[in-house]
Image (spheres, rainbow, N blue to C red):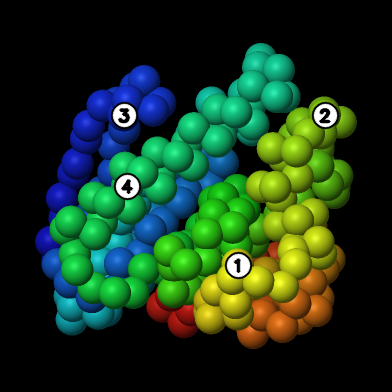
Amino acid sequence: MNREYVRWYSPRLHREMELLIFGHAGAKVLMLPTREGRFFEYEQMGVVASLAGKIEAGQMQLFCIEGMAGETFYSGWRHPGDRIRRHALFEDYVLSEVLPLMAARNPHDCTIIQGCSLGAFQAASLALRHPHLFRKLVAFSGRYDLTLKVEHFDDLLGGYYDDELYFRTPTHFLPNLPPGEHLDHLRRLEVVLAIGADDPFLDNNRHLSRLLTEKGVMHQLHVWDGRAHRAGIWRRMAPLYI
């Protein structure tokens, strides 16, 4: 399997950014890590290995990037507004630097975006706001409202709220999305959500599913037995849904 390490200085983030590329051809898969994950997390968790057959067959090429949670939503030392603005710069990096790199390396017309846990939120926020850029969204064990308090998971903004957060929170902006080109693109996006029956964000996933249904967005919600918020389950989900 082809494995390539890439690093460059991001003028948007004012720091070095790293990523790993696996494979040589096929659909491009942009993979966002969990809260504590790095660009090598999916390799370490065995998710890359679980997709080895598809990668080696030229069916898909993975682009595993940094998630920057420690500088954005989990940077408790920053003011909440600054956390959101740092996240916005991260999104700009993805859209303006990573996606062009992927297009330059691979001309395939299918781009998939995937994430687990916080990465699922990041993937869903990007794909549902920019559906014309992606063919498919795959999200495992996500919380699609970071202000939601469930079990030991707190409101990541400490009660702070502004328009920037509203427009990045799928379960907040979707209900008010009007008919038009954006919604037309959304209805062409393939959406796959997966969550465990005992996971803390099950109700939030069901809520997102209802909102998508109300907007006429075809999607799949897969509810696995037990608690699925862990690497071993994600390894099993990956070859089924990506």
The answer to whether residue 31 is left or right of residue 237 is: left
Q: Which mark is residue 98?
A: 4
The earlier-in-sequence mark between 2 and 3 is 3
Looking at the picture, which amino acid does disc 3 mark? Ser
Q: For the C terminus, which image quadrant?
A: bottom left
Q: Residue at x 16, y 58 (%)?
A: 105
Q: How far from the left and from the top, in percent, is residue 15? A: 34, 22
Q: Residue at x 81, y 61 (%)?
A: 176
Looking at the picture, which amino acid does disc 1 mark? His
Q: Gap between marks 2 and 4, in whole Å?
A: 30 Å
The answer to whether residue 92 is left or right of residue 72 is: left
Q: Gap between marks 3 and 1, in whole Å?
A: 29 Å
At label 4, counting other C-alpha atoms closer than 10 Å, the crowd grade (few under 14, some 14-19, many 20 or more) is some
Q: For the N terminus, which image quadrant?
A: bottom left
Looking at the picture, which amino acid does disc 4 mark? Val
Residue occupied by mark 3: 10
Q: How far from the left and from the top, in percent, is residue 2? A: 13, 61
Front: mark 3 or 1:
1
Whether pointer 3 and pointer 1 mark residues with C-beta atoms closer than 8 Å, the reply is: no
The earlier-in-sequence mark between 3 and 4 is 3
Front: mark 2 or 1:
1
Q: Gap between marks 2 and 3, in whole Å?
A: 28 Å
Residue occupied by mark 2: 160
